[in-house]
Image: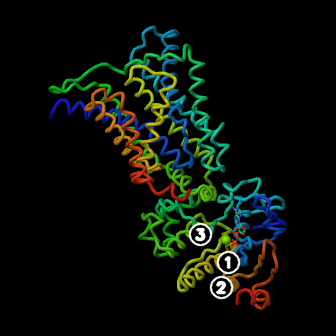
């Protein structure tokens, strides 16, 4: 579903990602771990084409992201949760969801039915549909951001530190929902600092350190790995 | 009501309407593109010249005395042409500065304003001289002691209708939703399959077309138009948008009404006030900026700079 092959990026003259390769298979849940500043969000931006890779390739659903462009990804079946949620704060919840729904260009889906589906997944959204998203609490915004990624029934969801800033109780609730998405057979790339939680629900993981993939493997192996234990646990 | 006060109110609303039509463009373009399009006044002021050219063409080729129908056709054509001119300005100039510091786009549009003015001056026959601009109508309604020019009513009505249409477009239509999304977060808008460049072109069309209507009213109100009238109209429109709060549509309207209020009051109460009006207008601008740098209704946009 998602393949990144030997991607290099720089900010000006400062090299950032170095030969980053990763893949997420159909229906697979993979996490990308790494400390602050490792280049996780840079990877997110390279995946969605907001940042141009100097070399290497990103393919989503078989298409080169550089060729098809950021604007085409939603209709290829990708949902995004960017770092910091990035809801449109003065737009209502419904408007935020509407834009994502339209972006998916899925003629078989109906907006009202999808809204209903999201409201079942996130009960707190239901009464808030006409509230400006910027006036909601952090936890509610996190749920709306996830609903926005899901409303077009994507086959792949890419999330950048979606649980950041949530209370421990909400984080649990959040990852239960993420696990449910995984169980529905959607491919997920979960970018996280919280290694323990991420590895507990993902099948495989990558560790990014200073722009390079330092480690990769099955979650169970990574949980036992000394580097990860040393860094996180 | 005192006839003089009524006349004063009417003048205030007419000027306020004209300034609003120009100020809205500044605010809209700043809100959506994050640029101060300083040549907006000059681009808008191309409209009366396009209208004059259309009238000329129609009267020479089709009907010798086209009258009001020709004038209305000319104004509609000018609105369309100037709207497209705005799109061209974005594509040729503003687009180059999308990622550049705001100051660069500002300087570029100041330069562009001069280019537009000089183009009008050289392309239009005897472009340095003021051109008489036909009145939409010279009819006057008498309401008791108050003389109400029908032109004033048209200006006010068209402006209110334009503002209503703009608000409807922004808040009730799919394209308006996309404009607001791009205004808030271009990058995420792209993840939602929105192409910001298209939205910018649409926004430039809307802003310039609305400005064109304002400039035509300005010329029709004055009875003449000259290639450099866009400077003053642009400065006033920009100031109105700034004191109302750049980026806020309501602010642009409020700022325009404030400035028009000072304008008409000075002209009415101070002997030879017409000569001093700009002093008072810009004193008000400075005063508001000192008291509330982000404008009356503005978010604190300048604090991060
Ligand atoms: N737009 C940018 N311009 C220059 N440097 C940047 C930019 N964005 C991020 N960086 C730098 O790149 C590094 C990696 O950033 P990021 O990918 O956001 O890390 P992470 O998401 O893993 O915390 C950081 O040192 C950050 O300061
Ligand atoms: Mg990050």
Residue B194 image point, x, y percent = 61, 52
In this rendered view, identify the residue nearer to me: A25 or B222. Answer: B222
Q: Which mark is residue B27?
A: none
| Depicted A79 relative to depicted B173: above or below | below
- Which residue position holds label 3? A84
- Please say if the residues under marks 2 and 3 sit with CB atoms less than 8 Å apart: no
Residue B160 image point, x, y percent = 35, 38
* Residue B172 can be seen in this image: no
Q: Answer left or right for B181 relative to B225.
A: right
Classify residue A135 by image quadrant: bottom left
Residue B214 image point, x, y percent = 43, 32
- Residue at the image point whose x is 41% and y is 54% from the top: B292
Name the secondary structure under disc 1: strand
In this rendered view, identify the residue nearer to me: A219 or B180. Answer: B180
- Please say if the residues under marks 2 and 1 sit with CB atoms less than 8 Å apart: yes
Instruction: Determine if the C-beta at disc 3 is less than 8 A from ligand 2.
Output: no
Which image quadrant: the N terminus of chain A?
Answer: bottom right
Q: Chain of mark 3?
A: A
Protein image colouring: rainbow
- Callouts 2 and 3 on one subunit: yes
* Residue B295 can be seen in this image: yes
Task: Measure the C-alpha gap from mark 1 to mark 3.
Answer: 12 Å
- Which residue position holds label 1? A192
| Depicted A222 relative to depicted B15: above or below | below
Q: Earlier in the sequence, mark 2 or mark 3?
A: 3
- Which residue position holds label 2? A197
| Depicted B109 relative to depicted A203: above or below | above
Q: Answer left or right for A211 relative to B237.
A: right
Q: Nearer the viewer, mark 2 or mark 3?
A: 3
Give the class, few, some or many, for how many residues have Cα within 10 Å of label 1's Cα (few <14, many ≥20): many
- Residue at the image point whose x is 46% and y is 16% from the top: B131
Q: Chain of mark 1?
A: A
């Amino acid at each position: 579903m998602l393949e990144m092959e030997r991607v290099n990026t720089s900010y000006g003259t400062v090299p950032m990602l170095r030969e980053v390769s990763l893949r997420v298979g159909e229906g697979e849940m993979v996490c990308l771990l790494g400390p602050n500043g490792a280049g996780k969000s840079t990877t997110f931006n390279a995946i969605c084409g907001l940042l141009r890779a100097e070399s290497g390739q990103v393919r989503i659903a078989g298409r080169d992201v550089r060729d098809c462009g950021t604007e085409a990804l939603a209709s290829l079946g990708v949902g995004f949760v960017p770092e910091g949620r990035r809801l449109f704060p003065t737009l209502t919840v419904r408007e935020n969801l509407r834009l994502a729904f339209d972006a998916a260009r899925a003629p078989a889906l109906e907006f009202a039915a999808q809204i209903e589906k999201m409201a079942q997944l996130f009960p707190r959204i239901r009464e808030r549909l006409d509230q400006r998203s910027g006036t909601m609490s952090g936890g509610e915004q996190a749920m709306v951001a996830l609903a926005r990624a899901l409303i077009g029934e994507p086959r792949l969801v890419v999330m950048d530190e979606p649980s950041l800033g949530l209370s421990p109780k909400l984080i649990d609730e959040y990852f239960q929902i993420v696990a449910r998405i995984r169980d529905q057979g959607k491919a997920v790339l979960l970018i996280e600092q919280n290694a323990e939680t991420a590895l507990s629900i993902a099948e495989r993981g990558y560790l990014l350190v200073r722009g390079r993939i330092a480690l990769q493997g099955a979650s169970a192996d990574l949980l036992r790995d000394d580097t990860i234990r040393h860094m996180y646990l | 009501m005192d006839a003089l006060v009524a006349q004063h109110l009417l003048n205030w609303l007419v000027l306020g309407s004209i300034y609003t039509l120009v100020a809205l463009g500044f605010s809209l373009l700043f809100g959506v593109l994050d640029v101060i399009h300083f040549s907006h006044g000059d681009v808008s002021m191309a409209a009366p010249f396009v209208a004059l050219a259309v009238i000329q063409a129609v009267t020479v080729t089709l009907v010798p005395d086209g009258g009001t129908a020709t004038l209305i056709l000319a104004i509609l054509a000018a609105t369309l042409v100037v709207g497209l001119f705005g799109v061209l300005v974005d594509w040729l100039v503003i687009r180059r500065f999308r990622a550049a510091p705001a100051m660069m786009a500002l300087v570029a549009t100041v330069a562009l304003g001069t280019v537009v003015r000089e183009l009008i001056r050289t392309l239009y026959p005897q472009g340095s001289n003021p051109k008489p601009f036909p009145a939409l109508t010279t009819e006057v309604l008498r309401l008791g002691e108050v003389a109400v020019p029908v032109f004033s009513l048209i200006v006010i009505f068209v402006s209110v209708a334009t503002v209503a249409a703009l608000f409807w477009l922004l808040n009730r239509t799919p394209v308006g939703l996309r404009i607001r999304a791009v205004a808030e977060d271009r990058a995420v808008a792209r993840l939602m399959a929105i192409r910001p460049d298209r939205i910018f072109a649409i926004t430039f069309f809307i802003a310039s077309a609305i400005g064109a209507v304002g400039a035509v009213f300005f010329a029709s109100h004055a009875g003449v138009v000259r290639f450099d009238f866009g400077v003053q109209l642009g400065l006033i429109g920009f100031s109105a948008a700034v004191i109302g709060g750049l980026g806020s549509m309501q602010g642009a309207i409020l700022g325009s009404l404030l400035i028009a209020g000072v304008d008409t009051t000075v002209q009415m109460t101070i002997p030879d006030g017409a000569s001093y009006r700009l002093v008072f207008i810009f004193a008000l601008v400075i005063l508001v900026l000192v008291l509330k740098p982000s404008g009356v209704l503005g978010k604190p946009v300048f604090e991060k700079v």
